[in-house]
Image (spheres, rainbow, N blue to C red):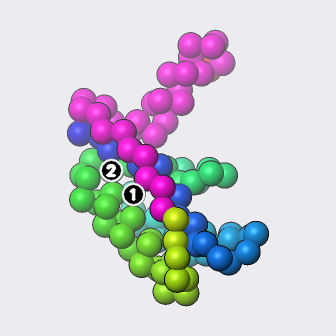
Amino acid sequence: MSYLALLSITPIGKGESVSKEVAKAFKIVKNSGLKYQLTSMGTIVEADDLKKIFDVIHKAIEEVEKENNRISVLIKMDCRKNREDAITYKVESVLEKIGDT
């Protein structure tokens, strides 16, 4: 089973720019050993074990909550059997269909 998770962790009440806090969460993802893709709206994480995904999410939340009283967390997941490297496959599939590969 392939698990993809789009993760966005945003502190509330820190003002307009939250990149410093977002970077703390992203560092946890980056150092997790899981495949990831940073985007402007969140980070996509891929694993073959659901527990690995939730462990990384939990650690990232814990890191951000150290200096924040309130955090907004968005998680969107895609769980699929018989698919590996879904983090790139899904994008490549769309690009192929429009002749942009």
Q: Nearer the viewer, residue 25 or 69?
A: 69
**Res 23 label:** none
* Residue 8 in the figure: left or right of residue 99: left
Question: What SS does tag 1 mark?
Answer: loop
Circle 2 packing at 10 Å, graded few (<14), some (14-19), many (20+), is many
**Res 47 label:** 2
Q: Position of residue 32 (x, y in %)?
A: 40, 66
Label pair 1/2, CB-CB below 8 angstroms = yes
Q: Which quadrant would residue 62 be assigned to in this image?
A: bottom left
**Res 34 label:** 1
Read off the magenta span: 73-100
Q: Is residue 26 visible?
A: no
- Disc 1 to disc 2, how far (Cα)? 6 Å
- Mark 2 is on which residue type? Ala
- Mark 1 is on which residue type? Leu
Q: Residue furthest bottom?
A: 67
Viewport quadrant of the C terminus: top right
Circle 1 packing at 10 Å, graded few (<14), some (14-19), many (20+), is some
Q: Position of residue 68 (x, y in %)?
A: 55, 83
Residue 99 magenta-drawn? yes
Residue for point 26% across, 53% down: 50
Question: What SS does tag 2 mark?
Answer: strand
Q: Position of residue 22 (x, y in %)?
A: 60, 69
Residue for point 54% across, 50% down: 37
